[in-house]
Image: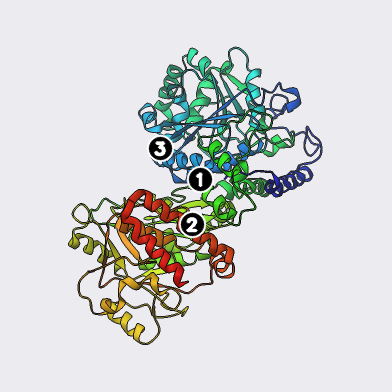
Amino acid sequence: MLPRGRPRAMGAVVLLLLLLVVGFFLFGRDPEYGLGTTATLDEKPYGSRNRSASSSQLLLPSKCEVMLHVAIVCAGYNSSREIITLMKSLLFYRKNPLHLHLITDAIARNILETLFRTWMVPAVVVSFYDAEELKPLVSWIPNKHYSGLYGLMKLVLPSILPLSLARVIVLDTDVTFSSDIVELWALFDRFSDKQVVGLVENQSDWYLGNLWKNHRPWPALGRGFNTGVILLWLDRLQQTGWEQMWKLTAKRELHTLTATSLADQDIFNAVLKEHPNLVHPLPCVWNVQLSDHTLAERCYLEAADLKVIHWNSPKKLRVKNKHAEFFRNLHLTFLGYDGKLLRRELFGCPNQFPPGAEQLQQALAQLDEEEPCFEFRQQQLTVHRVHITFLPHQPPPPRPYDVTLVAQLSMDRLQMLEALCRHWPGPMSLALYLTDAEAQQFLHFVETSPVLSARKDVAYHVVYQDGPLYPVNQLRNVALAQALTPYVFLSDIDFLPAYSLYDYLRASIEQLELGSRRKAALVVPAFETLHYRFSFPNSKAELLTLLDAGSLYTFRYHEWPQGHLSTDYSRWREAQAPYRVQWSADYEPYVVVPRDCPRYDPRFVGFGWNKVAHIIELDAQEYEFLVLPEAFSIHLPHAPSLDISRFRSSSTYRNCLQALKEEFHQDLSRRYGSAALKYLTALQQSRSRA
């Protein structure tokens, strides 16, 4: 949902101002020399040529009329997370429309297409380019750098970017902005007629070759240049014969150096060593490099107005150097910053809505804030940012009867994950409803858990919080859409399946010949315990013993018996084979269905009727319900959610839920005609009983 005002952004703005104040006292008050001392380097100081030009000395482009072009190479799951923090910092300060040119592998494209489509940031255009097309152009270059082939692709950007694109800023994913990128763009105007690339001097002694004995770097001008931030004048670059130039240089140097150590950066430097007239040195503050051997402090001693921070060490935020804590705090500010606050329009510019945003604004404007069910209506219209496969994931090998467990959760159910992984050895697709800050806590939780970090077949999808009600069915749909197996087990996070359930379900699907021959939903009977500690049954026989002893109950038998009444637990006790049951009012079992089953109705938010509506949809589409005789899943006790508390305490909440039910039935009637009459009759009978 697009925010209507700015109050929610104030807290983050105050925090950023606080960080700037800390930096002011940490780095000193002199606007030019930082701590008031001029540092001298062994060769040449980051002095006159690198000193940052203030924005008042630059002729900045019009904030509305000039679109800035930014190119980024991004591959894999981790880089797809890194780029989000970069984008938050860039969007926070920018005042111009942006066109992002993302060169990605299939993984990153899948993630980032979903993210930017659901982020809905105004005045941002995103174009994707297939990195596979560039691999043959650089695969002949041996590269020792951890970035692999992707670390060489900046050399060949002119071959994939549009011919009409004259200038572009190229960024690594591990940079953080602390200034408006338009100031960087304005530095193109300082290029001479022959200069085609703008770079910041490398802020270490790497290219001087004196870091250790027998260290032999690629040739470079002095300390060389760092390619984490590049200004590329593309049309000029092509006129200079750039492709032939860098290839000849690389082939010559590889005769003696065998491989690049710093990927494209080595080759850029070797070319510029031969052709120094091609490079325009940029002020050092546009690429403050925090590597292990950094000399960056000599830059910001001379310029307190830092612009871009570059985490160019494999250790990233764990790197140790002077003032690293300050830079880390600035980065963490954006890491946890609420991304929905960046859905703001550019003040004073014509509206540049992303696809669907204008219609969404109009629909929101038509809502009556005084209407009792306003929160429900607003939540239904909310478009949540979605980051699919938030962590590295290994898709399961294709198997004809495989099953993915699908569920959703919030931060207060995180402790269920380890137990669930022990019970379910198969693939899982889980949607998590988190704030930006909670997403980082979740990342740490998984990385430090021996159980969770070992499971690469669990796909986690972060849906970022927005609105007062829990969008339970939207979360389920996200998790369901990302399942990769032919079948899915639609469960909830507070249920632990039988240890043998995964294997049993696959065998049952094969034996029952589901799929093209039979349209069925396999029912997994649900039970519950009221004990936080109990011995989980290893078999149906053990479960029945616990049931008879009063340690287990059929699920919600004392609160919502109709929810699982049709499962017919008495028959299940004796059953040796699957048996068919009929739909009944308010039936909401946990089922195994084909992956292409109907999606959940997103209008149901908060507590109540979210699964019921889905089961009705399955029945309306003529799925038969088959109860499996050896399957079971057990609900564990937990504190009630905020939404169920509101349902129990608020008659308004319950009335709004009733209104949603009636609207759902009206939609059913439109789609299924007279076949939907039985559902409406059941609803009316339910209301009369209430």
Residue 419 in sight from this viewpoint: no
In this rendering, would 621 be left or right of 252? left
Q: What amino acid type is highlighted by mark number 1?
A: Arg
Location of mark 2 (residue): 660
Number of the front mark, 2 or 1 = 2
Q: Between disc 1 and disc 3, whose residue precedes?
A: 1
In this rendering, would 642 be left or right of 431? right
Residue 565 in sight from this viewpoint: yes
Quick check: 631 above or below 163? below
Q: Position of residue 496 (x, y in %)?
A: 39, 69
Please state which of residues 581 and 340 is positioned toward the viewer in this rendering: 581
At a point 42% along the width and 75% down the height, the residue shown is 556
At a point 57% along the width and 50% down the height, the residue shown is 378
Location of mark 3 (residue): 105
Please state which of residues 297 and 86 is positioned toward the viewer in this rendering: 86
Location of mark 1 (residue): 81
At numbered mark 1, what does the secondary structure look like: helix, strand or loop? Answer: helix
